[in-house]
Image (spheres, helix red, strand yellow):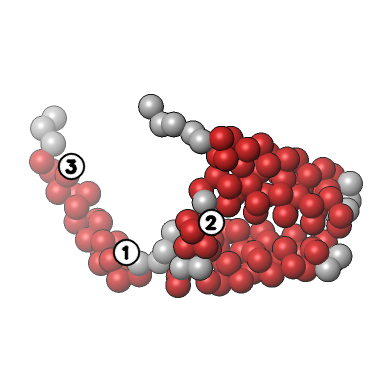
Amino acid sequence: MISITDWQKIGVGVTGFGVFFILFGILLYFDSVLLAFGNLLFLTGLSLIIGLRRTFSFFFQRHKLKGTTFFLGGVAIVLLRWPLLGMLLEAYGFVNLFKSPEKKCECQASDRAAPVTVVLIFLERPC
C-alpha cells in the first residue's frame, strides 16, 4: 500500500480548492481574481503533492519548455488581469505539457510496414 504523507494530503486539498476557484472563475465570466487565486492554489498544491524538486524537473525539461512557457506565461497574464488571454495561453501550454513526444522516424517506418503486417496476420490465422 502507498503511504501518503500529511503534506501530500494538504496538497490534494489545496489543489482541489485551486481547481474549484478556476472553474468558479470561468463560470463567473472569467473573473480575474478567482482565476488568479485558483492558479496560485493549483500550483502550490501540485508542489505540495509531488515536491518542489519534482515540480521543477517536470516543468523545466528540455522538450517541455514550450508548454511550460505558455502555461506559466498564461498564469502571469491572468495575474496581470487579462483573464481570457491568460486562460487561452494556459490551455495551450497545458496541452503541450502533456502531449506525447513526437517520434517521426519510428512512426513513418512502422506505417509503411503496417499493411504487410496486417496481411501476414490474416494469412497465418487458421479458419
Mark linked to residue 55: none
Q: Residue at x 76, y 50 (%)?
A: 38
Q: Residue at x 51, y 48 (%)?
A: 50
Give the alpha-carbon distance from disc 2 to disc 1, as whole Å: 35 Å
Q: Residue at x 78, y 44 (%)?
A: 21
Give the alpha-carbon distance from disc 3 to disc 2, as whole Å: 52 Å
Q: Secondary structure at mark 3?
A: helix
Q: In what quadrant of the picture does the N terminus appear?
A: top left
Residue 110 seen in the current view? yes
Residue for badge 3: 122
Q: Residue at x 79, y 63 (%)?
A: 78
Residue for badge 1: 107
Q: Secondary structure at mark 2?
A: helix
Does residue 102 appear to the left or right of 55 in the view shown?
left
* Circles 3 and 1: CB atoms closer than 8 Å: no
Does residue 12 appear to the left or right of 119 in the view shown?
right
Mark linked to residue 52: 2
Q: Earlier in the sequence, mark 3 or mark 1?
A: 1
Q: Residue 79: image x %, image y %? A: 80, 64
